[in-house]
Image: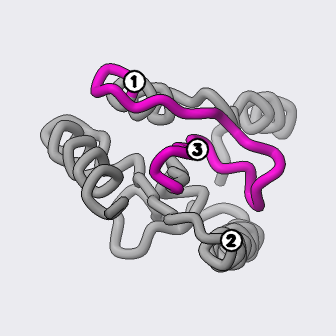
Amino acid sequence: MDILSAEQRRRCMGSVRSRDTGPELVVRRYLFAHGFRYRLHARRLPGSPDIVLKKYRAVVFVNGCFWHGHEACRYAALPATHAAFWAEKIRGNRERDRRVDLELSALGWRVLTVWTCGLKRGEKERTLEALAQTIRNDNK
């Protein structure tokens, strides 16, 4: 049973952002502070990647564990209410993510994904360092 009314739930879900989210800003600040320069949400590329590093031929998606169905992640649990709707919604998101990854790879881009669970306390620095290392080293 949902504790919010239908109107409250509608307003709550309507306020969920798809751009400039907290986790996305964390990644962007880290990359900029470490010398990376990038473009945001390049609409000419499939999936409008969150971060585009043209110099490195890499794109970064900052995915929410719930919204993109991060496997074996405690933050990706389906809600008890409207479970069928959410299962279908997340399945569709994952399918779209796979399709976009393939399209970008076919165009010669390296696709990197940062999950929001990797930006939680205790994991954030390790996740961001690994991202920077991957961007720099895989460019050779």
| Rendered position, 49 above or below 13 | below
Mark 2 neighbour density, 10 Å: few (under 14) some (14–19) many (20 or more): few
Q: Amino acid at mark 3?
A: Val
- Secondary structure, mark 2, is loop
Marks 2 and 1: which is nearer the front? 2
Measure the C-alpha gap from mark 2 to mark 1. Answer: 25 Å
Q: Where does label 3 land, which residue?
A: 52
Residue 102, quarter of the rendered image: bottom right
Outermost residue toward the front in this view: 140
**Crowd class of label 3 (few under 14; some 14 to 19; many from 20; radius 10 Å):** many
Residue 38 lies in magenta, yes or no?
Answer: yes
Q: Decide whether the magenta segment is chiefly helix, strand or loop.
A: loop
Residue indicated by mark 1:
32
Q: Residue at x 23, y 39 (%)?
A: 124
Front in this rendered view, residue 123 or 107: 107
Residue at x 20%, y 43% (from the top left corner): 129
Q: Magenta span covers which residues?
A: 32-57
Q: Could you tell me how far apart the alpha carbons at marks 1 and 3 are, in whole angstroms?
A: 12 Å
In depth, the one of 36 and 7 nearer the eye is 36
Residue labelled with disc 2: 107
Q: How many C-alpha atoms fall within 10 Å of the one at disc 1: few (<14), some, or many (≥20)? A: few
Q: On the rendered image, what quadrant is the C terminus found in?
A: bottom left
- The amino acid pointed to by label 1 is Phe
The tag earlier along the polypeptide, 1 or 3, is 1
Q: Nearer the viewer, mark 3 or mark 2?
A: 2
> Residue 61 at x, y = what percent?
54, 52
